[in-house]
Image (cartoon, rainbow, N blue to C red):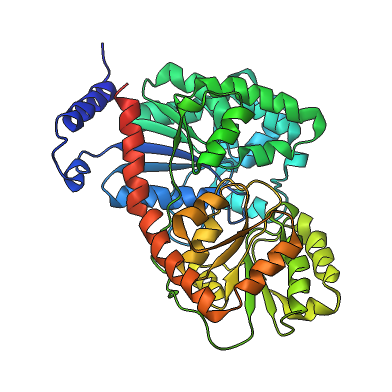
């Protein structure tokens, strides 16, 4: 016997298969229910959950039903939050389950209180860490799924998805949640996909005693997914190799950005000192030290140049920021840290005060959402030629590439952008092409194409 959800999926696939001559707008009237299981960023602005929020909104605006489910902590975004006002795998309970096995046997009526979003938000201000080096045991217990201490939490999430929501497709936003999939497949017969968007960065940050065990467990658990999504071809190939998965099981879903509120225009600023900008999480892997070293070199050619830095700063990285600023020596006076803007308007105002943008990462960036935001406001970019950046630059033409981890080469690139006419060319091209290639509409169309392919199987 087929369940109602299976019959609904089959009907949609048949309708699409025999209406190829209809317009895209007509096809989009055949709506789907999509569940996206995302992970909160422990109180910080997290690029992955911010993108998941934009993704969910774009699908909703196209007429699809979307349930954006937060896990661990509520998500924090700088625009309208589309997620459920409910948290699964609440971070406080996950921690207690992992440390005290008897906690999992406590009445759910009692432990459920600790999953309240307001309480978790309060906790993240004081004690919750998302530093991989401190989360080895917890990571492994989560990946072990039903075999570990979080079985009850897994059953609660899986039951909610399969029995209450009954979606057409389920998409987990990272492989660290793969421990919930095996049990879900016992309840739910639709396709279950996984979006990979930085999992390797977290896993590589684990202590040596946990890293290989965690990678091996995820590689095994990843077999339970029906397919994988990445935002770039680079990351598709990288993660297929990293997790020993068939590359043919991967689909590329380009990043999408909601351009509402991004008011910057494609024109070079003509007043004020030449200003270089950085906007990303303040951490070694994001490469602020590379940019500061390049800025010192740039000031030898443009003494009045300025560097403005914005982004989330965790307590554990305050010393890093202090050391980086001190490394600029006498040029530290030309550097300003503006903190982490709390709203989209504040972020856009910051971006519009820049002439050029750069986040010269140490690691192989799988996304680069901050680059798209700069381009959306007409700010050209200078980025290292690794990770997803070459694909973004090829698609937008909004800047130049320089060798990675090379402050001298980065300084030359920033110097090249100081020419107003030259900069204006990249600004206009990037502003136009980011809207053409990374729009919500393009993201929705590709999502529908991928999901239809899964349903047709």
Position above or below: 29 against 212? below
The foreground one among 313 and 282 is 282
Tell me if residue 3 can be seen. yes
Indicate left or right for 114 with 282 as reference.
left
- Name the residue rendered at 71%, 57% in the picture: 287
Q: Residue furthest top?
A: 1
**Quadrant housing residue 276:** bottom right
Quadrant showing the N terminus: top left
Tell me if residue 149 can be seen. no
The foreground one among 424 and 155 is 424
Quadrant showing the C terminus: top left
Position above or below: 417 against 198? below
Q: Residue furthest bottom?
A: 271
Q: Position of residue 363 (x, y in %)?
A: 68, 47
The number of callouts visible is 0
Indicate left or right for 213 with 196 as reference.
right
The foreground one among 240 and 257 is 240
- Name the residue rendered at 80%, 76% in the picture: 332
Q: Position of residue 431 (x, y in %)?
A: 43, 67
- Name the residue rendered at 75%, 54% in the picture: 284
- Name the residue rendered at 51%, 49% in the picture: 391
Q: Position of residue 37 (x, y in %)?
A: 48, 38
Q: Position of residue 26 (x, y in %)?
A: 16, 44
């Amino acid at each position: 016997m087929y369940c109602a959800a299976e019959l609904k999926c089959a009907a949609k696939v048949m309708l699409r298969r025999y209406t190829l001559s209809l317009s895209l707008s007509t096809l989009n009237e055949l709506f789907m229910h999509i569940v996206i299981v995302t992970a909160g960023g422990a109180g910080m602005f997290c690029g992955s959950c911010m993108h998941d929020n934009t993704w969910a909104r774009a699908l909703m605006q196209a007429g699809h039903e979307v349930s954006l489910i937060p896990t661990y902590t509520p998500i924090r975004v700088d625009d309208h939050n589309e997620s459920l006002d409910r948290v699964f795998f609440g971070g406080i309970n996950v921690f207690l389950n992992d440390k005290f096995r008897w906690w999992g046997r406590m009445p759910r009526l009692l432990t459920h209180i600790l999953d309240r979003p307001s309480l978790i938000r309060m906790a993240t201000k004081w004690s919750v860490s998302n530093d991989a080096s401190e989360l080895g045991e917890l990571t492994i217990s989560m990946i072990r799924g039903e075999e570990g201490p979080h079985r009850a939490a897994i059953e609660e999430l899986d039951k909610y998805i399969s029995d209450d929501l009954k979606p057409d497709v389920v998409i987990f936003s990272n492989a660290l949640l793969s421990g919930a999939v095996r049990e879900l497949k016992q309840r739910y017969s639709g396709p279950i996909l996984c979006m990979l968007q930085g999992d390797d960065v977290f896993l590589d940050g684990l202590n040596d005693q946990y890293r290989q065990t965690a990678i091996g467990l995820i590689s095994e658990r990843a077999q339970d997914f029906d397919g994988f999504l990445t935002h770039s071809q680079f990351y598709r190939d990288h993660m297929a190799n990293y997790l020993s998965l068939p590359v043919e099981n991967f689909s590329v879903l380009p990043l999408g950005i909601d351009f509402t509120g991004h008011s910057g225009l494609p024109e070079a600023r003509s007043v004020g000192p030449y200003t270089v900008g950085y906007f990303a999480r303040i951490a070694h892997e994001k490469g602020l030290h590379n940019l500061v070293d390049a800025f010192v070199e740039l000031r030898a050619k443009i003494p009045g140049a300025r560097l403005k830095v914005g982004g989330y700063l965790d307590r554990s990285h305050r010393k890093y920021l202090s050391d980086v600023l001190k490394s600029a020596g006498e040029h530290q006076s030309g550097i300003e840290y503006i903190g982490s803007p709390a709203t989209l308007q504040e972020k856009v105002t910051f971006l519009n005060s820049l002439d050029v943008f750069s986040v010269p990462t140490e690691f192989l960036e799988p996304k680069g959402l901050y680059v798209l935001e700069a381009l959306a406001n007409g700010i050209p970019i200078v980025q290292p030629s690794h990770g997803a950046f070459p694909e973004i630059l090829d698609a937008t033409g909004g800047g130049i590439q320089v060798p990675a981890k090379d402050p001298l080469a980065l300084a030359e690139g920033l110097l090249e952008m100081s020419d107003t006419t030259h900069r204006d060319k990249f600004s206009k091209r990037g502003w136009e092409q980011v809207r053409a290639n990374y729009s919500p509409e393009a993201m929705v169309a590709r999502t529908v194409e991928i999901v239809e392919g899964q349903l047709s199987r």
